[in-house]
Image (tube, coloured by chain):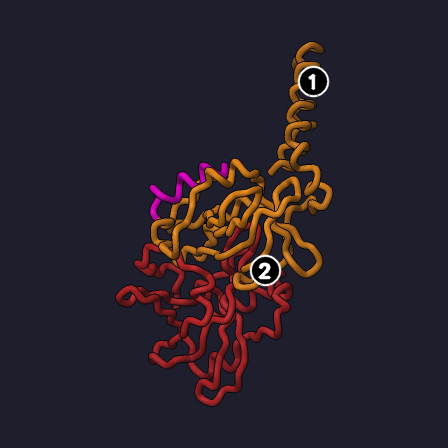
Chain colours: A orange, B red
Amino acid sequence: MLAKRELKLPVREKAIRRIINMKTILKTIAVSLLLIVVGAGGSLAWAKNKNPATTYPSLVGASEIKGTHVKNLQNQDLGQIDEVLIDPDTGQVRFVILEVGGFLGLGATRVAVPLSAFQITQEGNISKWVLDADKEKLKNAPKVEGKNYQRLYTRSEAEPIFVYWKVTWIEPGSNP
Amino acid sequence: MNTTEQKTGAATLLAASEIKGARVFNFQDQDVGDIDELLFEPDTGEIRFAVVSVGGFLGLGSTRVAVPWMAFQIVNEQGRVKYILDATRERLEKAPRVEGKNYERLYPANAAEPVFVYWDVEWMAKA
């Protein structure tokens, strides 16, 4: 997502250059640089490895990723994938349950994260999972208790999780 | 047969690890095997295939076949999820196989589309 934002900048700058004065250009560049610095600060680590097409040209076996470690943009280990939750009607993976270990002093807990919040890249024959999260973000993230996954089906429970992880809401039981 | 409009009425999310091992029945209520794996496309989150492990069903040797997720009728039977597939012995025998864990092979359209066609599921071309 960060990569996409960065790619858009030159195009936007070109358009602006045609219609406005130098002062605004400088202001725009300053803002752009700020955006890049803020964005790249975190994303540098994974941007280097990032396939420009952002595709992972393979299928992932749901049972194979259980136990896969998830890193954040700072390359810290956040925990591991505990479960994949699917909507049977649409055949869509909705949530990945992340088991957060003792990361930075947080107690063991399980959080539900929409699949689209992850950056999934290919590393050899396995998938690498990256999530933009720090200790604070994980601490306040919506938790999952036990195996009561039915709760996550309802919009009232699921939508706040999508909002929390800043990804586009997908209606349950609808094809995106 | 068009099964893409089937609704489970389950109104719940299913855990992938709990689906693994679920029995699959055919229209004659014969146990044809179990779900061995779910294969999803990481960019879109779409479950493309379930890998069904066909046991000794009606004399077929042990084999694994790829079945598009939408080929299944998933019904909620008193709180238990039941997976139904229009699969006779004949149909399973000729179904596209999966060898080992080389799931990458099922990713390209030229490999995936024939599987959809085989199971009478509309192929959704990648956007």
Q: Which mark is residue A59?
A: 2
Quarter of the image where one finds residue B77:
bottom left
The answer, for residue A111, to whether it is visible in the render is yes
Q: Is residue A4 magenta?
A: no
Q: Position of residue A134 (x, y in %)?
A: 57, 38
Q: Position of residue A111 (x, y in %)?
A: 46, 47
Q: Which mark is residue A17?
A: 1
Do discs 1 and 2 belong to a common subunit?
A: yes
Which quadrant of the rendered structure holds the N terminus of chain B? bottom left
The magenta-colored residue range is A154-166
Quarter of the image where one finds residue A91:
bottom left
The answer to whether residue A28 is left or right of residue B93 is right
CA separation in Å, label 1 and label 2: 43 Å
- Front residue of A111 and A162: A111
Q: Position of residue B21 (x, y in %)?
A: 45, 72
- Majority secondary structure of the magenta segment? helix
Q: Position of residue A71 (x, y in %)?
A: 62, 47
Disc 1 crowd, CA 10 A, few/some/many (<14, 14-19, 20+): few
Helix, strand or loop for disc 1:
helix
The answer to whether residue A5 is left or right of residue B86 is right
Q: For the point 62% across and 36% down, which residue is it? A: A2
Instruction: Establish if A52 lies above or below B81.
Output: above
